[in-house]
Amino acid sequence: MRVWLWRLVLIGGVALYGAGAFACSFHYTKPERTAVDWLVGGDHVVLARPDPENPFAFAVIETLRGTETVEAPPFLVDSVTRRKMAANRSDAVLFARDAEGAWIRAAYVSSVFRPVIAVALSNASEWSLSYTKDRFAVFEDLQDHPDPALRQLALQEIDKAPYALLRGMDLRLSGEDLVRQIWTRDGYTYQSIRVLLLGIDGSPVARKEVHDFIDRVADWDWANNLGAFATALVELDGADGVDKLDRVFLSDPRQPADKLEQVVEALAIHNGLTDDKVQAQIAKALQRLAETRADGAELIARQFLTRNDWTQARLLETVLEDRKQTTPMGLISVAVYVAQARAAGALTNGG
């Protein structure tokens, strides 16, 4: 490899990782930990009820994680919680203490919630290391549970799942139910996972919602969750969906880079999971993007590198050798991708 390329790789490795360049732009990005995350990985996790001597303060009734004695979480017991717990003597609130020592109210624990705690604790050693198929299966089963707290927890947990698991799930939420929540204030936080599930649902109402959004944002300067909608479109329409994304976004020189990157991410997600026909359409769209737009190769390099997908190695090697259709920072991104593709055996020493 040429000396200038190695220098770019060394510089780029620091610059890209230091900047957090590979974070997913629409999925698995929720900042909060779920109740299950605390149960399998928290240092101090307790159950608490109103203190018999002071009904407006909590008292710890059970320690689920942690060995040292801790003070009661400094939360007031609101009137709604107080009435619910007075009527349900086995109910409690799940609290967890974060790394800074601050207490987090993680969940209201009813009688139907307690079995989830038992399952999480019994699987803590495995679930704390990675998101497993077994963990996904537990919450896939709860997706349409009659208890709203468990339904919400199931959605939060499904939102953490790799897309490959989502594609194989037994989806029991209807397209109508998913669409109903997408644009509500309470539902917006988990809009992206509901959109991804629309692609899996495949019903006429799901198809209409996805296509309408793609058409609606074509001329917008920005579009939150475009990546989720683009992923759903390819799930729904396969190669035809890729072609539409190419025509509407990737081939339009007026589109801003942040919108294009969301589309490229969607294509990168599908590229490792789809059939040859869709892969060929993705390759065609990405080649045109890299050849016609100065920042196109950079977007491709970032999104395919984070997935260790080396299928674009030949394309980006050509861009790198020509040093034409890319920006200075883009050259670094492409150099890192090509170097790692070569190290993975995707490119021979002769190119």
Image: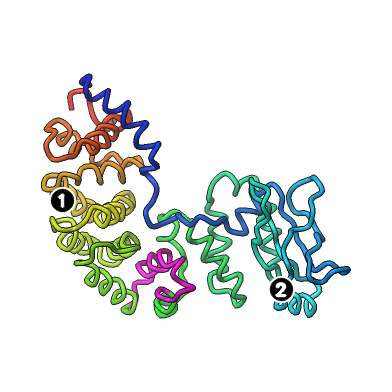
Q: Secondary structure at mark 1?
A: helix
Q: Taking 125 as reference, is 108 above or below it?
A: below
State which quarter of the image contains the N terminus: top left
Counting from the top left corner in percent of width and height, residue 301 is at 27, 41
Find the magenta span and give its range: 182-203
Counting from the top left corner in percent of width and height, residue 275 is at 27, 54
Relative side of 167 to 1, left or right? right
- Residue found at the very far right of the displayed protein: 53
**Would you name the residue on which mark 1 appears?**
284
Crowding at label 2, few (<14), some or many (≥20) Cα neighbours within 10 Å?
Answer: few
Q: Secondary structure at mark 2?
A: loop
**Would you name the residue on which mark 2 appears?**
78
Counting from the top left corner in percent of width and height, residue 249 is at 19, 60
Counting from the top left corner in percent of width and height, residue 38 is at 64, 53
Q: Quadrant of residue 327?
A: top left
Q: Is residue 184 magenta?
A: yes
Task: Mark 2 and mark 1 in contact? Answer it, CB < 8 Å.
Answer: no
CA gap, disc 2 and disc 1: 58 Å
